[in-house]
Image (cartoon, rainbow, N blue to C red):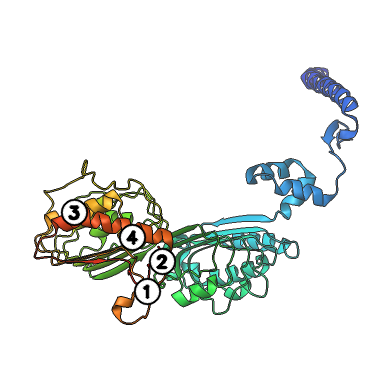
Amino acid sequence: MGKLLDLKRLMSVPKERNRRRRQRQIRARNGSIDSVAKRKGSLCQQVANSDGERRTRYSGPNLPEDIWCHIHSLMPFKDAARAACVSRAFRRSWQHRPNLIFCIGTLGLDFINKIDRIIKNHSGIGIKSLQLEYDTFCNARRSASISYHLNNWLQIAVTPWIEELILTLSLSSYNVDYNFPCSLLSDGRGSSLRHLYLGSCFFHPTVNLELRNLTRLHLVTVHITGDEFGCLLSNSYALERLELKYCYGIICLKIPCLLQRLSHLEVRLLLGESLQMKTLSLDYPSAVYYARAELPSNVPNLEILTICSDHEMVDTPMLPSKFFYLKCLTIDLAWRLSPAYDYFSLISFLDASPSLETFCLEISQDRMENELIIGDMSHMRQMLEHRHDNLQSVEIIGFCYTKSLIELTCHILDNTTSLKHLKLDTTRDVFSCSTGKHDKCFPMGKDMLTEAKKAVLAIETYIEPKVPSTVMLNVVKPCNRCHVAES
């Protein structure tokens, strides 16, 4: 019995030593913390736990809760999450954070309940930004029920205080008939919305929505018609950036003239299967470059092509692709064309269209670089190896005396044996008394008249000597009777 007691005593010695060692470490640590606490004042507090050990907790300044919430809202998302893990003040703020992001993969009942609880906690508080990403591919069996939950979440989230709303369904969501409730954006509830992004859903606004502060609008694979889209834009006067991708219900895109702040427009179409398309009209910035680079392979059977483009900054590239069946080509280069644009590069379209019969080029350009000096024939570019044997009619409206445009016109005359009609209009196609429909020509300013006279002189110097007798040349000049007082 005595040996047994001695054995127990010996076994308890290491435990006792370890306990004393831990106490010494705690006292040493508390001593150092106490010194720090004394230096920092009331920011550090000593708290005793259930074991009698003292621990130090940082209490921070005594600020109102709304200030803590504001500070927390300014943090990046990851930093805000870390702060909520170590601070009670930030933890309370985290529960009411105004920016919410939900990436919904495999959908389960527990996950739905969590989202419900989080969004309901914000009811009455206000959500500034809500992003919902839903993967329908992983939730094919639940595609019907998700509409119910989305409507409930949006009903709580969309208030007059929301500034950003992003709803993205995966590309496999063609089988999900989710109809975005447009009524949520009416009656002032969308008045503070600045960014709206909708992906893969139905969107059918039938009344004017109050989106007066909307600056960014993105619609991707959204089922919406042109009239409905016009209804959406009718009150979006602050819109600066508009992106439409694969919204096939919009046959004709009309941008209201009241959208004076709109500086970025991006329209993306999926033409990969448009093998039977015969007629196509493109109207957006940089459409000329896109048409030459992408259309030949996407719409190989195209016969009539109309391109309207402003802000064309890049010259047309020379590429091997062809428009084998294109017969009529119209290119309208509007007001904001770069002064340095090279019209000679449009030969790329003529070279790519062996069946082309009619070519019309419309120009509206006030400022030009590389103006032609009359009498200077040096460095006039030629491409004699490019033939256009089916081209019969060419019309250039707004003909000016820039060197590259004269080079293009001379190239057509030198390389087109089939040409029958050439019309060069120096008046930008304004109505004229010569038609018999008007008593007087449309007024032309002094600068416009000066430009027109220079263009006529360039035609007489460089173009007319090259016109063969088989080609009917029609030069439209300012009327001497109507414009004599304006010059």
Q: Looking at the image, is mark 4 or mark 1 earlier in the sequence?
A: 1
Q: Can you tell which mark lies on residue 452?
A: 4
Query: Cβ–Cβ below 8 Å for labels 4 and 3?
Result: no
Q: Looking at the image, is mark 4 or mark 3 earlier in the sequence?
A: 3
Kind of element beneath mark 2? loop
Residue bearing the label numbered 1: 441
Residue count near mark 1 (Cα–Cα under 10 Å), binned few <14, some 14–19, many ≥20: some
Q: Position of residue 409 (x, y in %)?
A: 21, 56
Left or right of 105? Residue 369 is: left
Residue count near mark 2 (Cα–Cα under 10 Å), binned few <14, some 14–19, many ≥20: some
> Does residue 274 lie above or below 3 as drawn?
below
Q: Nearer the viewer, residue 277 or 17?
A: 277
Left or right of 365? Residue 131 is: right
Kind of element beneath mark 4? helix
Residue bearing the label numbered 2: 444
Residue type for callout 2: Met
Residue count near mark 4 (Cα–Cα under 10 Å), binned few <14, some 14–19, many ≥20: many
Q: Can you tell which mark lies on residue 410?
A: 3
Q: Position of residue 157 (x, y in %)?
A: 66, 65
> Does residue 188 lie above or below 127 as drawn?
below
Kind of element beneath mark 3? helix
From mark 2 to mark 4, how far is it between C-alphas? 10 Å
Query: Cβ–Cβ below 8 Å for labels 2 and 4?
Result: yes
